[in-house]
C-alpha cells in the first residue's frame, strides 16, 4: 500500500510538469500558425489529454468489462465540466470565445443526447459506435475547415519571410509531445495504483469507474486546464474541457464499441442517475458560459460544489 502511494505522488508530479510543457507547446503552435488557441484546445490538446480515457476504456472492453468502460466516460465527462471548469474559474474567471458558445457547446449538448438515446436500451452496439465515430470525424473536419478560413483571414506571412518559423514550430511540437507523454504516463501511474488501493478496500468496480478511474483518467485535463488558466490561456482551458467531453462521448465510446466483441453494457444505475447527472451538468454549463461570455468565480464555485455533492452521493 505504501508503494502505491509513492507511485501516486510520482504520477501527480509527472502530470503537473507534463501539463506545463503541453500548454506551452500548444499555445506557441497556435500562435505560429495563426490558428485560434480555442481550436488547438478543442482538438490537439483535448484529444491528447483524453488518451488515458481511450486506453482504459479499450482495455476494459477487451477484458469483457464494458460497463466499466462506459462508467469511465460518464464519470470523466461529469468531472470535466463540474470540477475542472469549476476549479479553473475559481483560479481566474474564464473568458469564453463566441465560436465556442455558438458552435462547440451546442454540439456537446447534442452529442450527450445522442449517446443517451443510443444506450437507452441498456447497451451500445457496434452500429451505434460506428455512428459516434462518424459524427466525430465530421466534427473534426468541420473544425479544421473553419480554422483554415480564420488563418487565411489573418494573412499569415509566407515561410520565406520568416526563416526561423519552422524551427520554432518544431520546438513547440516537441514540447507538446513530451508534455503529452508525461501526462499519459503520470495518469497511468495514478490510475493503476489508485485502483489497486480501491480493490483492496473491496470497492465495487462500477463505482471505481465512475469515481477513481474517471478522475484519474481526467487528471491530464485537470492539470492542463488549471495550468492554462494560470497562464491566462482561458480558451485552451475551456476548449480542452469541451473538446475532451466531445472526444469521450463520440471517440472513446465509438472506438471502444467498435473494438469490443460484445455490445457495451450500461447498468440501470447509469441510465437512471449518472447519464442524467452528465446531461444536467452539460446543460447547466451552457447558460453560465453564454452569460457575458465569461465563467465567473461564483459560477465556478457552483459547478465545484455540484461535483462534490455528486461524488459524495456516488460513494454513499
Image: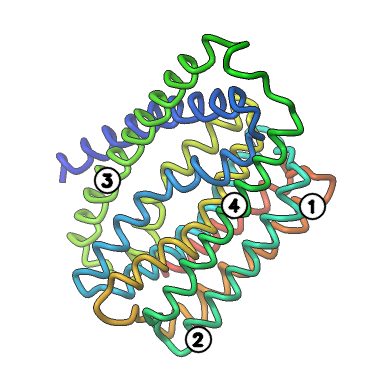
Q: Is residue 119 visible?
A: yes
CA distance separating discs 4 and 2: 23 Å
* Tag count: 4
Q: CA distance from mark 2 to mark 3?
A: 31 Å
Q: Residue furthest right?
A: 292
Q: Earlier in the sequence, mark 1 or mark 2?
A: 2
Q: Of marks 1 and 4, which one's residue comes earlier in the chain?
A: 4
Residue 240 position (above or below residue 214): above
Residue at 63% from the left image edge and 30% from the top image edge: 233
Left or right of residue 118, residue 35 in this image: right
Q: What separation in Å lies between label 1 and label 2 (alpha carbons)? A: 30 Å
**Given contact means CB atoms under 8 Å apart, are the residues at marks 1 and 4 in contact?**
no
Residue 129 is left or right of residue 155, and the answer is left
Q: Which residue is at the front of the view, 291 or 311?
A: 291
The C terminus, quarter of image: bottom left
* Chain-order first, disc 3 or disc 1: 3
Residue denoted by label 4: 242
The residue singled out by tag 1 in the image is 290
> Would you call the spot at circle 2 few (<14 residues within 10 Å), some (14-19), or many (20 or more)?
few
Pinpoint residue 13: horizontal percent, then vertical percent. Answer: 33, 30
Q: Is residue 216 visible?
A: no
What's the residue at 51%, 55% (across, down)?
A: 79
Task: Nearest to the eye among marks 3 and 4: give it.
Answer: 4
Q: Is residue 257 above or below residue 290?
A: below
The Cα atoms of the two marked residues, 1 and 4, are separated by: 14 Å
Instruction: Give percent across and percent down for residue 82.
Output: 58, 54
Amino acid at each position: 500500500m505504501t508503494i502505491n502511494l509513492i507511485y501516486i505522488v510520482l504520477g501527480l508530479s509527472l502530470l503537473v510538469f507534463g501539463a506545463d510543457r503541453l500548454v506551452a507547446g500548444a499555445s506557441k503552435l497556435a500562435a505560429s500558425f495563426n490558428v485560434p488557441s480555442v481550436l488547438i484546445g478543442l482538438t490537439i490538446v483535448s484529444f491528447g489529454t483524453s488518451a488515458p480515457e481511450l486506453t482504459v476504456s479499450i482495455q476494459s472492453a477487451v477484458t469483457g468489462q464494458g460497463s466499466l468502460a462506459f462508467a469511465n466516460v460518464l464519470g470523466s465527462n461529469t468531472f470535466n465540466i463540474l470540477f475542472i471548469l469549476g476549479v479553473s474559474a475559481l483560479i481566474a474567471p474564464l473568458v469564453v470565445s463566441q465560436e465556442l458558445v455558438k458552435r462547440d457547446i451546442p454540439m456537446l449538448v447534442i452529442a450527450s443526447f445522442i449517446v443517451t438515446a443510443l444506450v437507452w436500451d441498456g447497451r451500445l452496439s457496434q452500429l451505434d459506435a460506428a455512428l459516434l465515430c462518424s459524427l466525430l470525424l465530421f466534427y473534426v473536419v468541420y473544425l479544421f475547415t473553419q480554422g483554415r478560413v480564420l488563418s487565411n483571414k489573418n494573412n499569415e506571412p509566407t515561410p520565406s519571410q520568416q526563416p526561423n518559423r519552422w524551427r520554432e514550430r518544431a520546438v513547440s511540437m516537441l514540447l507538446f509531445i513530451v508534455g503529452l507523454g508525461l501526462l499519459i504516463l503520470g495518469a497511468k501511474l495514478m490510475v493503476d495504483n489508485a485502483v489497486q488501493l480501491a480493490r483492496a478496500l473491496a470497492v465495487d468496480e462500477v463505482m471505481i469507474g465512475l469515481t477513481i478511474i474517471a478522475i484519474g483518467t481526467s487528471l491530464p485535463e485537470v492539470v492542463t486546464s488549471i495550468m492554462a488558466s494560470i497562464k491566462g490561456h482561458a480558451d485552451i482551458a475551456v476548449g480542452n474541457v469541451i473538446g475532451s467531453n466531445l472526444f469521450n462521448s463520440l471517440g472513446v465510446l465509438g472506438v471502444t464499441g467498435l473494438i469490443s466483441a460484445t455490445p457495451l453494457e450500461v447498468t440501470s444505475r447509469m441510465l437512471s442517475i449518472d447519464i442524467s447527472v452528465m446531461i444536467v451538468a452539460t446543460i447547466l454549463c451552457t447558460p453560465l458560459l453564454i452569460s457575458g461570455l465569461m465563467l465567473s468565480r461564483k459560477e465556478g464555485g457552483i459547478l465545484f460544489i455540484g461535483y462534490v455533492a455528486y461524488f459524495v452521493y456516488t460513494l454513499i
